[in-house]
Amino acid sequence: MIEFDGVTHRYGDRLVLSEVELRLGERRVAFVGANGSGKSTLARMINGLVLPTTGRVLVDGLDTAHEGRAVRRRVGFIFTNPDSQIVMPTAGEDVAFSLRRSGLPKKERAARAAEVLAAYGLDGYADHPAHQLSGGQKQLLALCSMLVLEPDVLVCDEPTTLLDLRNKRRFVEVLKELDQQVVLVTHDLDLLDDFDRVVVLDEGHVVADDAPQPALRHYRKLVD
């Protein structure tokens, strides 16, 4: 369960979020809104990348402001640009790097990395130069580097922005099959039909919170 309890956030004098109250327990939740609506800031609060100015964010009862390390063990985060997450020369090394604090021997980390890569469409790519992968493959690599840690929640901040339509659909199909709770920030509204819940933000306020169809109707009226 992810809880936003009276959450307000400011960047300097600019109010980004205002008194947000949410309890998110569904498996698939999307945040949508225009640029600057506050949706990415809200998503980044789930694993403590951004902390509230006032209010609190809880993940399974853990306060992100005071129990950040425990929260980050539960919450994985995928950024818009996978290049910002790829830190090692090869795909296998990059996934294994996520396990550096696991206590596993190096060979076991490499084996686990190869296993996860194979499970999510990158079988045989363990020794491939990470930055020479295609855009869609890089985003899958970023996903694998999070999933190898077996988080309970996966937050994805506009992960399909740099992908073509085929890879967008492929990536979202992978998300749909995951056991983790997924929170997706996106502008790709046509990808959300099968989601459980859509939260619409506008100028830092939650203005709709419903099943995909009614929530997206509300959003489209805002931008028309």
Image: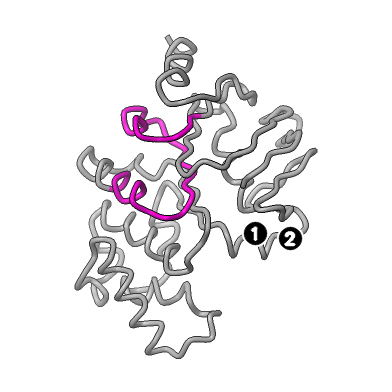
Residue found at the far right of this picture: 54
Q: Secondary structure at mark 1?
A: helix
Question: What residue is rendered at 34% in x and 42% in y?
Answer: 160
Residue nearest the observer in this picture, 113 or 79: 113
What label does residue 67 carry, if any? 2
- Crowding near the residue tagged with mark 2, few <14, some 14–19, many ≥20 C-alpha atoms within 10 Å: some
- Tell me: 207 left or right of 197: right
Q: Is residue 121 magenta?
A: no
Front-most of 3 and 200?
Answer: 3
Q: Residue at x 71, y 55 (%)?
A: 62
Label 1 Cα crowd, 10 Å radius (few <14 / some 14-19 / many 20+): many
Residue at position x 62%, y 45% in the image? 2
Displayed quadrant of residue 97: bottom left
Identify residue for label 1: 71
The residues bearing labels 1 and 2 have C-alpha atoms spaced at a distance of 6 Å
Location of residue 29 in the rendering, given as x and y in whole percent from the top left corner: 48, 38
Q: Quadrant of the C terminus?
A: top left
Is residue 124 positioned above or below 132 on the image? below
**Image: 119 above or below 37:** below
Three-letter code, disc 1: Val
Do the numbered discs 1 and 2 sit on residues whose CB atoms are within 8 Å? Answer: yes
